[in-house]
Amino acid sequence: MMDLPFLETSIKVRYDVLADAVKDHFDNALAATSAKAEIEKVVAILYAEGKVEGKNATARDANVKVMLKDSYDCLEVLVEDERHAYLRKQLAEIDVAKYRAILRIAELADTEKQTTHYEKGEINVS
């Protein structure tokens, strides 16, 4: 079984990775949300200025997508980056949970070992 100091160091490293993953996910989510809000603002301006043509909502939405193709393409990339960041965060959470469980098992095994030595009179508590 792995020794406790090694496991304690390992879990600290994994918590650092998790913290970085949470920050990365936040940054990516913020970028995607900001880009979406900016597109919505531009779309509202286009409608207000009467620059969107079409007989019905479907045709107008299609025209907006054509007019803002580059913005929508950028948004798609940002959303995909956010999904990947979320996945990395989830994987880091799983890794932390795994190492927490391993550390707990090692601590219990160490406690059991010490208890057994005490019961045998191998450990002097005086």
Image: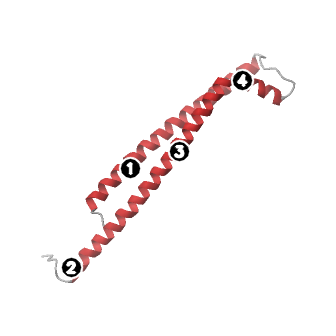
Q: Where is residue 83? Give x, y as percent.
A: 56, 42
User: Label 2: few (<14), some or many (≥20) within 10 Å?
Assistant: few
Using the numbered discs, state the Cα–Cα distance from disc 2 to disc 4 in whole angstroms: 76 Å
Residue under pointer 1: 15
Q: Position of residue 102 (x, y in %)?
A: 37, 63
Asked if 40 appears above or below 83 in the picture, the reply is above
Question: Percent x, y for residue 84?
Answer: 53, 42
Residue annotated with mark 4: 44
At 36% from the left and 68% from the top, the residue drawn is 105
Q: Nearer the viewer, mark 4 or mark 1?
A: 1
* Residue type highlighted by circle 2: Tyr
Say left or right for 82 vs 118: right
User: Extreme left residue here?
Assistant: 126
Give whichever of discs 3 and 4 has the lower sequence position: 4
SS of the residue at dot 3?
helix
Q: Report the amino acid beneath label 3.
A: Tyr
Q: How far apart are marks 1 and 3 (CA)?
A: 16 Å
Q: Name the residue under label 2.
A: 118
Q: In which quarter of the image is the N terminus?
A: bottom left
For residue 86, the mark is 3
Q: Earlier in the sequence, mark 1 or mark 3?
A: 1
- The residue sitting at 36% across, 65% down in the picture is 104
Q: Is mark 4 on a helix, strand or loop?
A: helix
Q: Is 65 on the left or on the right of 23, as rendered?
A: right
Amino acid type, callout 4: Ala
Measured in 3D between alpha carbons, the distance from the residue under mark 4 to the one under mark 1, in whole angstroms, is: 43 Å
